[in-house]
Amino acid sequence: MPAYVIVEVEIEDPSKYEEYKKLVPPLLEKYGARYLARGGKVESLEGDWKPGRLVVVEFPSLERAREWWASEEYRPAKRMRQEASRTRMVVVEGLPG
């Protein structure tokens, strides 16, 4: 089953975050993932959630998403993201195709 990593990002260091954005696509590709949304327009429909930037990444499985997040290859980029922004990140398992 696919899994989706959903990230709410508040960028604090734009130049460092831009560097992070350059590092991540090849790492996602290695784990079979692809962006579904990456910083497009966000509109709240209900409640008080008002995220500024959202990123949605599809992985082939929950296991692959976890492997990517915990990988040695992603560790330097993850550190860069954490230094450049405040994020909230979840992974949710999708429905079978």
Image (cartoon, grey):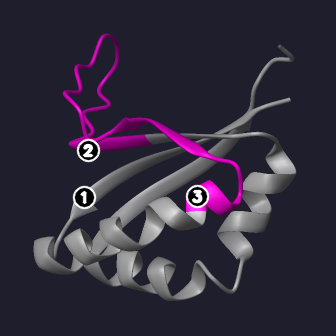
The quarter of the image holding the N terminus is: top right
* Along the line of sight, the residue nearer the viewer: 52 or 1: 1
What residue lies at 49% left-to-right and 78% top-to-bottom? Answer: 78
In this rendering, is residue 5 above or below 2? below
In this rendering, is residue 6 above or below 26? above
Q: Which mark is residue 47?
A: none
Residue type, numbered disc 3: Leu
Q: Is residue 26 left or right of residue 50?
A: right
Viewer-nearest of labels 3 and 1?
3
Distance from disc 3 to disc 2, alpha carbons, whole Å, reads 19 Å
Asked which quadrant contains residue 15, the reply is bottom left
Task: Tell me which segment is drawn in magenta.
Answer: 28-55
In this rendering, is residue 39 above or below 43? below
Q: Which mark is residue 53?
A: 2
The location of residue 34, given as percent across then percent down, is: 55, 42
What residue lies at 23% left-to-right and 33% top-to-bottom? Answer: 40
Provide the residue designation for mark 3.
28
Is 50 colored magenta in this rendering? yes
Q: Is residue 70 left or right of residue 87?
A: right
Q: Upstream in the sequence, badge 3 or badge 1?
A: 1
